[in-house]
Image: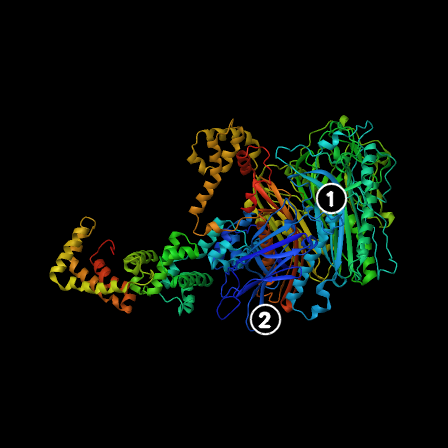
Amino acid sequence: MTSELDIFVGNTTLIDEDVYRLWLDGYSVSDAVVLRVCSGILEQTGATAAVLQSDTMDHYRTFHMLERLLHAPPKMLHQLIFQIPPSRQALLIESYYAFDEAFVREVLGKKLFKGTKKDLDDISTKTGITLKSCRRHLDNFKRVFKVVEEMRGSLVDNIQQHFLLSDRLARDYAAIVFFANNRFETGKKKLHYLSFGDFAFCAELMIQNWTLRAIDSQVDDMDMDLDKEFLQDLKELKVLVADKDLLDLHKSLVCTALRGKLGVFSEMEANFKNLSRGLVNVAAKLTHNKDVRDLFVDLVEKFVEPCRSDHWPLNEY
Amino acid sequence: MPGKLKVKIVAGRHLPVMDRASDLTDAFVEVKFGNTTFKTDVYLKSLNPQWNSEWFKFEVDDEDLQDEPLQITVLDHDTYSANDAIGKVYIDIDPLLYSEAATVISGWFPIYDTIHGIRGEINVVVKVDLFNDLNRFRQSSCGVKFFCTTSIPKCYRAVIIHGFVEELVVNEDPEYQWIDRIRTPRASNEARQRLISLMSGELQRKIGLKVLEMRGNAVVGYLQCFDLEGESGLVVRAIGTACTLDKLSSPAALLPACNSPSREMKESPLVHPPSHGCRSTHNSPIHTATGSRLTQNFSVSVPTLIYTGMGSGSAGKEGGPFKALLRQQTQSALEQREFPFFTLTAFPPGFLVHVGGVVSARSVKLLDRIHNPDEPETRDAWWAEIRQEIKSHAKALGCHAVVGYSESTSICEEVCILSASGTAAVLNPRFLQDGTVEGCLEPRLEENLPAGCGFCHIPYDELNMPFPAHLTYCNNCRKQKVPDVLFTTIDLPVDATVIGKGCLIQARLCRLKKKAQAEANATAISNLLPFMEYEVHTQLMNKLKLKAMNALFGLRIQITVGENMLMGLASATGVYLAALPTPGGIQIAGKTPNDGSYEQHISHMQKKINDTIAKNKELYEINPPEISEEIIGSPIPEPRQRSRLLRSQSESSDEVTELDLSHGKKDAFVLEIDDTDAMEDVHSLLTDVPPPSGFYSCNTEIMPGINNWTSEIQMFTSVRVIRLSSLNLTNQALNKNFNDLCENLLKSLYFKLRSMIPCCLCHVNFTVSLPEDELIQVTVTAVAITFDKNQALQTTKTHAEKLLQRASTDNEELLQFPLELCSDSLPSHPFPPAKAVTVEKASPMGEGNFRNRSAPPCANSTVGVVKMTPLSFIPGAKITKYLGIINMFFIRETTSLREEGGVSGFLHAFIAEVFAMVRAHVAALGGNAVVSYIMKQCVFMENPNKNQAQCLINVSGDAVVFVRESELEVVSAQQPAANCQPSCPGGEVTT
């Protein structure tokens, strides 16, 4: 006696969050069944392994059918095939697009479309995330990138509108897209200590202050590209290092601004010239694409490391 | 002349990409009704076209309006080659044809293709202008309302219940026409879908005509079925109960429907409600019809078996001379009718007087080609024969009517089993005729019959019983006789006194049969049927005793025929009726009483059985009040007291054991273990596992003993197919496989729905089919409803609390209150000040707005929820309007089975699509739920070698508008002009 066909269809689509989690994590049906057995569900419910197997299969099939809709979340809202309460829909979408920071850290700033795919295996072994899940992560990034790439207006808003993500997740995606677009180098060993959160914070500030829209919201360009003029202007900062008077003026202004707010104020004051020179040099080079990519590496080399060597307790970028 | 159909195509969305080059589609729409076709413009390069067409107008006869579906085809325009079809939408416009139902059909419909499934959606608006037609010879029956619900629909009252209507139409199946060899599967599927749609329209119209002839205005309990007879054609048949319904004008008018006519009725002093009794009759006379219609049918008659609670008698005799006046009068009302059958399973109060027992008839037929589709005489004759038989069985039980009546077929190759079953009953005549007719009704009837036991009393003469039964005085009123066990096909009457809770009881059985051709095959099946019926009955009886219950409701026995086996599946809901005697236990008797170890084994089994009974009593809370022996009286002193137990009617007679079952006050049901077979049976009795705690299940509308339902419902369909290993197939192995299949399926359901605990699976409907030699397919549709264990007691208390709460809250806080809080208290407000009313009004909206604001950007455009349930009601809500019948037939086929996820993936997607299409149609009618939903057919065929599969699904139900009880109070508060007709807030329909 073998089961040829075994399905369950509810008028309201039945979704088991635990199984959804397992599916998202890329486990096969049999692995998922084993994991569920381990969770003690059989004892709680008095079910048999066969029941669990059939239930897991069924959920996986449902998720597989839902996946097509999850690729375009607004479709999920209008589709008629699965009756799912809105709160559940939001949860499905949010979890589908949620990502593992360890994975993002690996691909952050890399070109999303080439090369990375064959590296997925390595990433998978390195991070312990299943290959399937890695692929979903990467496909999500690519999908979001592709949709908002050419779009105008606020990056976060665009992502939120087209993928119906929560504010936080949309911001994270904005950071990922921003990094991917500008191809900032984040993989160097020196940068390894920085978490995705740190970069996301930088990205947000940069989107707010360094992009075209930051300067003039009327300008019909996007959040994704750095403002060329702004970068050009940065070049002029060289005077801050070259001209002694300006250097002093700058120093006194910065010191006034930071006095009392910085625990390491005296060290900062002492090292101001070096630090400032490092920063200005990095800034001045940003007109070249290659240097833009190396922004974070340079910053760490020229600014963070000197600070660290002076035993600053905090990184105050 | 009398109708103008107007159609407007608004827009499409989520269309598939039809042009690979541009990743876009140039879509246009063809709108076809009858022979007229209109086209929209081509909307270039878009997956979300906005056609915004003009109104396409069709001027048609109302006959066509009833028969024809509106056919909308979405196509991709191609300059150089033929246009590609994207998909179709069939819209049944019948709901627009009666005044009280929907006025417009407007909404998003899934675009369906039989090969690709749903491919996007299309927004359509449909309206009908009907002109009055007074032509009395008209062929149409516009205006007759149809309901699938097998009780009087909630917002109507029955003025008269006229009786049985039936009709069938036949045609050639397009799948088997010569042209099918040269056309594509898509064209063939579409031809079939269209034909069936046409045929059901025609059938409905013809039934409507019959209803008009009877001067009724509605059909309740409408059941339409398809018989795919293969080569010999396609039969669409329907049965229903014609009624004259009156819309309840105000919610306050909840008086029993019967008041007015009954006033004029005379008292009849003689009315002694006929004595009572209960028993079930399963009759299976079997006939086979052969060859062409011109040759004489040869028929194989099998002695009729009548089963009783106690054992089996040999034959049924005509009901005795005793006839109460009441019965005579009922009879006069019923005798005018050819078949006094009612497809209803629940009745207005006072309608059902007595219940006799289950009557059923089956007949085996050989299918032959239908030569002249316009004169489906053969099929008509077949059914007439069976109905006649049912009628005579009912008579034998002293009943003139059959309620809870249904018909079904099972077809395998050219053999077809026709089955009909129902519950013999005595009805109150006042509903059956016009008020002017002198009827007989005794107003004191109700007093004579204490509520809750009247229907149990035997309708037949106790001195002249048609079968040996065991009668006692009713435990409730002590005046009338009741049988020891009662089997019925109807729902539990609302006024019945039940102790404890009920449970689903199933009997499952397989029998191998040799493969044979034509007559030999039919004869073989005929010979097997009585044994199967007998065993199914025995199983039911044993399981019922094991559950310590004494009555079955909603009994449905399905016999399915396959190439090499027959399957029987009986489902029913067991309950403990307070009026009936306490069931005795089960006793096991061994054949060789001298063998010591054997004896021990037997006593061990006996102990196990006793333990199970005790456990079940506890589980289902069956604690009947102790009754002193004097009152109960010993079983009626009568010679018939001794009953016989036969294993099977036609086993050699020397095996027949006579047992005196009257030991003391209780009679035990004796199981004789004389061979391994019987052993097996006992074992299988004990292996049935009860549902996990917190779960109950039944196959009736409501679960006896549970009444505090909450509003969470989940309807579902589950399908399983197993392949039997063809080796060593024995009856036992088959039985075990089948039993496991059903048990595992139930276990799976309990597991899946565990988050709804405490909950009850209601209206559990199992269907078995044998699509191929070694395949068994089981389809289950049911609804899970949660209930609140503690709520019932608290309601009164909380009401007062709510009042207090309300007094202390100001308007702003009210906005965030759950709706019930403010509405509940309203009626008790002395004079609802204008201000308070506006607050009530604002609260639902306020809440809505609030929700929208906090939701993600696009959430406000989500699709409205449409509930589906096989029940006739929605817990916690009131149905305010019936919008019309939903009756849909779909075919889905694939030639890339593996790519679509195998058979499971294919069928899963298809059923989800069917649900989606049903919901879309209901939403377009302005409804928010489907009640009495049923999946009548799910025929699945696969050919994995060719990577192909095909499935046909037929579903039906009633589209309704419901309002949550809490919201309803708000509405009525806003319209203090008491006659707030559910139909009058037109806004409901459009919103």
Locate residue A63, reporting x and y percent: 52, 57
Q: Which residue is mark 1?
A: B242
- In primary-sequence order, the first of circles 2 and 1 is 2
* Subunit of label 1: B
Q: Is residue B473 visible?
A: yes
User: Please, is residue B312 above or below residue B264 in the view?
Assistant: below
Locate residue B190, reporting x and y percent: 65, 62
Q: Secondary structure at mark 1?
A: strand
Q: Is residue B570 left or right of residue A309?
A: right
**What's the mark number on residue A57?**
none
Q: In the picture, residue B474 is in which quadrant?
A: top right
Q: Secondary structure at mark 2?
A: loop
Q: Are marks 2 and 1 in contact (CB under 8 Å)?
A: no
Which amino acid, by three-letter code, is at mark 1? Ala
Q: Number of callouts in the render? A: 2
* Subunit of label 2: B
The foreground one among B716 and B207 is B207
Locate residue A192, reporting x and y percent: 32, 61
Q: In the picture, residue B258 is in which quadrant?
A: top right
Which amino acid, by three-letter code, is at mark 2? Ala
Q: Is residue A207 left or right of residue A244?
A: right
User: Please, is residue B884 above or below residue B663 in the view?
Assistant: below
Q: Which residue is mark 2?
A: B82
Q: Is residue B566 visible?
A: no
